[in-house]
Amino acid sequence: MASTFGEIFRIHTFGESHGGGVGVVIDGCPSRIAVSEAQIQVELDRRRPGQSEIVTPRNEADRAEILSGMHDGLTLGTPITILVRNTDQRPAAYDEMAASYRPSHADFTYDAKFGIRAASGGGRASARETIGRVAAAAVARQVLDVFHPGIEVVAWVKSIQHLEASVDPATVTAEAVESNIVRTGDAAMVEPMIALIKAVRADGNSVGGVIECVIRGCPAGLGEPIFDKLEADLAKAMLSLPATKGFEIGSGFAGTQLTGREHNDAFRMQDGRVRTTTNHSGGIQGGISNGENIFFRVAFKPTATIMSSQQTVTADGQNTELLGRGRHDACVLPRAVPIVEAMATLVLTDHLLRQRSRVGG
């Protein structure tokens, strides 16, 4: 079950970075939903390698093949299988890594857990696994459009190392984010961020940063009390992504500097519905959405593979040094934006279907 996510809209991803392919099995998708393969491909193209001068040059088309669960463009209500074949594998580039553990990668921990690992490209621990998540979320998006049109999920690069963008979550658009290869919503920060990534890559190094995401138009009432709170599932979704190291929602850690009088979101009636005057809660109270914008941040560490010699140990316990090889992102954030949106979409779809199963509609 370690590769399964969701309760009703449930996904199970499969595949390794340099194996025959990667993909996803979706179970629990309602029947008779019109699903566009083109829309799935759009989302896969947003996360694929080789899309710009600041990402890994691995040459993969990432073409989605729907193998089951569809007939004449409609979902059957049975499991949907989507496969993306790997076509640009270079396992020979990882021969040295098969014997030595790469610092800050999952090599040692996978050996400790399973006693075996696919060394090429990190195998199952590679970000290539997220293809299945993005494909599943493209289907989930089309489910949302049927049952609750108007929900928007927009993520953007907030910061890369010390460079920080100024973006208004209430007004930022997907078009603005997609208009630049960094995927930030602040036009003034595009060139400085590109320059930083290029400089770090030229030095054989890497950088991390923060992605912010807003969910607009989410109805009140999604989320479960106690263990399946909406923010808890969002946190699990985001921290399940490769290279993530932190999650904040609403005021986050900065909220600890406020008093209760400053932090509380006062209620008022507006246009016939309950609203809040502020949104320190980040759109979720008591684990349940309140109808305001849901706003959160995800921290990504610097890419673990760097083109410098580092101290490590071999699988048989010998101290050694290892030089990073292969094709990698010097900064994962631009390609992580659609993945953050995908995981948020999966959480929303699952909770919407859970709520519908409880109250109908």
Image (cartoon, grey):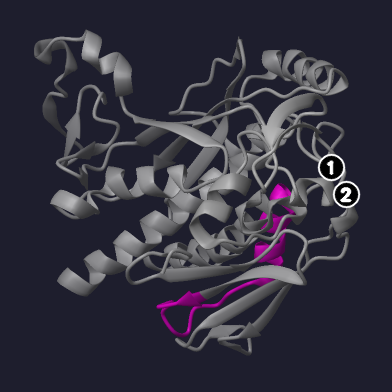
Image: 204 above or below 148: above
Q: What stretch is highlighted in magenta?
A: 26-47
For badge 1, the amino acid type reads Arg
Quadrant in the picture for the C terminus:
bottom left
For badge 2, the amino acid type reads Ala
In the image, is 154 to the left or to the right of 15?
Answer: left
Question: Circle 2: is it few (<14), some (14-19), or many (20+) Cα within 10 Å?
Answer: some
Residue 125, visible in the rendered structure: yes
In the image, is 199 to the left or to the right of 300?
Answer: right
- Per the image, label 1 sits on a secondary structure element best described as loop
Place residue 131 in its image quadrant. bottom right
Q: Which residue is at a point 47% across and 69% down the rendered structure image?
A: 11
Residue in the foreground of this view, choosing between 298 and 203: 203
> Which residue in the structure is indicated by mark 1?
327
Indicate whether residue 37 is drawn in magenta: yes
Q: Which residue is at a point 68% across and 42% down the rendered structure image?
A: 101
In the image, is 291 to the left or to the right of 310?
Answer: left
Residue 192 x, y percent position in the rendering: 75, 13
Image: 143 above or below 126: below
Asked if the residue at tag 1 contacts the one at tag 2, i.e. Cβ–Cβ closer than 8 Å, the answer is yes
Residue 328 x, y percent position in the rendering: 79, 39
Residue in the foreground of this view, choosing between 111 and 90: 111
Image: 197 above or below 84: above
Q: Which residue is at a point 81% across and 24% down the rendered structure image?
A: 308
Looking at the image, tell me whether mark 2 or mark 1 is earlier in sequence order: 2
Residue 360, visible in the rendered structure: no
* Label annotation for residue 93: 2
